Amino acid sequence: MGEIFEGKKKLRFIASLVLFLLLLGTFGYKILLEIGFLDALYMTVITVSTVGYAEVAQMDNEAKMFSIFLIFVSLGTVGYLFSSIVSSLLEGDLRLAWRMKRMNKDIFKLRNHYIICGAGETGLNAIRQFKKSKV
């Protein structure tokens, strides 16, 4: 169960990192290029994604240096994101999380039941008693 919370914590951290990166880039371009929010967000997305469409405003040296910084930071962030996803898939975190969610859903549906843990001598006697009393 702890692995699931660890995975969710990691996912929240990565999402926060990506959001921070988008905000940093957007406000950085908005200030440096003196452009609107949507244009600044667009510049951030094309820079972070390394698509490289045309700039929406004339880039001065400060804006170019900011773009270089943003590219390096975003490459590191996106690399960390993909490596986390791949490691989660390979280590079975997602499969375990799905299985635990399904199990919890099934447990939540249970009513008027007993759980016998262990099938040793005591557990087998408990099973016999339940069968005998038709429980």
Image (cartoon, helix red, strand yellow):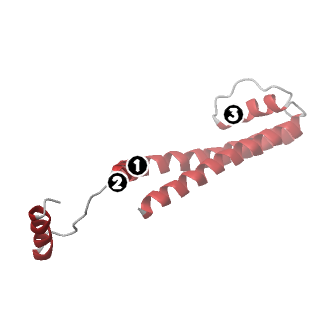
Tell which of 92 and 42 is nearer to you. 92
Q: Is residue 59 left or right of residue 79?
A: right
Q: In which quarter of the image is residue 51?
A: top right
Tell which of 80 and 72 is nearer to you. 80
In the rendered image, the vertical position of residue 35 relative to residue 70, given as above or below: above
Q: Residues within 10 Å of mark 2 (few under 14, many from 20)?
A: few
In the rendered image, the vertical position of residue 52 relative to residue 96, given as above or below: above
- Residue sitting at 22 percent across and 68 percent down? 117
Question: Looking at numbered disc 3 in the image, what kind of residue is underneath it?
Answer: Val
Q: Quadrant of residue 48?
A: top right
Image spot of residue 61 (x, y percent): 85, 39
- Residue sitting at 38 percent across and 52 percent down? 108
Q: Residues within 10 Å of mark 3 (few under 14, many from 20)?
A: some
Disc marking residue 107: 2
Front tag of 2 and 1: 2
Which residue was labeled with disc 3? 45
> Going by the picture, which residue comes out furthest to the right?
34
> Going by the picture, which residue comes out furthest to the top?
54
- Residue sitting at 13 percent across and 59 percent down? 134
Tell which of 49 and 113 is nearer to you. 113
Front tag of 2 and 3: 2
Nearer-N-terminus badge (2/3): 3
- Residue sitting at 43 percent across and 47 percent down? 86
Question: Looking at numbered disc 2 in the image, what kind of residue is underneath it?
Answer: Ile
Question: Looking at numbered disc 1 in the image, what kind of residue is underneath it?
Answer: Leu
Which residue was labeled with disc 1? 94
Image spot of residue 116 (x, y percent): 21, 66
